[in-house]
Amino acid sequence: MNAAPASASSDDPQIAGSITRETPADAAAVDALVIAAFGPGRFAKTAERLRERAPLAAGFCLHEDGRLIGSVRLWSILTGEARSVFLGPIAVDKASRSTGLGGELVRACIEEGKTLGLDGILLVGDPPYFSRFGFQPAPEAVLPGPVDQRRVMWLPFTAAAPVGAVRPDV
Ligand SMILES: CC(C)(COP(=O)(O)OP(=O)(O)OC[C@H]1O[C@@H](n2cnc3c(N)ncnc32)[C@H](O)[C@@H]1OP(=O)(O)O)[C@@H](O)C(=O)NCCC(=O)NCCS
């Protein structure tokens, strides 16, 4: 599926292809999809500590026949002076993987970050997957707990990889 250019207008629920902005009505299905993808162990992760305290900046969903098959969320954070978002969790239903949907969700996040005028996007994830979108290692970003620093990645828009504490932009 080819993504059309993403629109970040919050008045426009249709983002790209079949991507829509997450609404409160999606929340339960998003939670179920993420638990199916990561298991309950995700709540122990440092990334979750950050998400608990950071405001939700945006969420994107993919539906097929009225069923949620993909989702991603963005959380407002600051790293030094850099304004950015923390991407995750991202999940695609097992039966729908490897057809480009994950890539569409990541690209919607990138368009959103650019439209919001952010300095970059941070995440904790698998470098072999996220490097294809331009994410680079951010070994000196300090998250609020233990994390495998090799998995901390930054997509720069205006600022180089962050150094120092990552905190919620409240
Ligand atoms: C990661 C995820 C969202 C990708 O969704 P998707 O719709 O399959 O993504 P795409 O179709 O854009 O890309 C698929 C490709 O990425 C590869 N890929 C998927 N996850 C990967 C990972 N963690 N590391 C490296 N490569 C990965 C697949 O092997 C596939 O490769 P291929 O095109 O050569 O077959 C999905 O696999 C998922 O929900 N995984 C479980 C949750 C998860 O681990 N999320 C965070 C990842 S750090």
Image: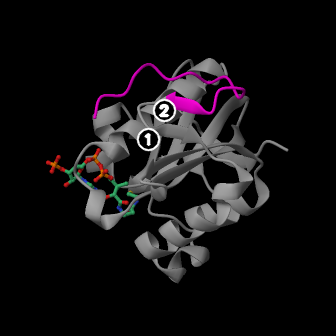
Residue 56 x %, y % = 72, 47
Number of numbered markers: 2
Per the rendered image, the range of residues in magenta is: 1-15
Taking the image as four quarters, which one is ligand 1 found in?
Answer: bottom left
Residue at image coords 71%, 35%: 80
Q: Cβ of disc 2 within 8 Å of ligand 1?
A: no
Looking at the image, is 15 positioned above or below residue 5? below
Residue at the image position 70 percent from the left and 30 percent from the top:
83
Residue placed under numbered mark 2 in the picture: 108
Please indicate, yes or no, whether residue 87 appears anywhere in the rendered image: yes
Q: Is residue 7 magenta?
A: yes
Q: Is residue 145 visible?
A: no
Relative depth, front residue between 154 and 36: 36
Q: Is mark 1 within 8 Å of ligand 1?
A: yes
The vertical placement of 128 against 10, above or below, is below
- Label annotation for residue 14: none
Provide the residue designation for mark 1: 105
Crowding at label 1, few (<14), some or many (≥20) Cα neighbours within 10 Å? many
* Magenta span main SS: loop
Q: Secondary structure at mark 2?
A: helix
Instruction: Give amino acid for label 1.
Output: Leu
- Give percent across and percent down for residue 170: 85, 44
x then y, percent, for residue 118: 64, 24
Indicate the amino acid at tag 2.
Ala
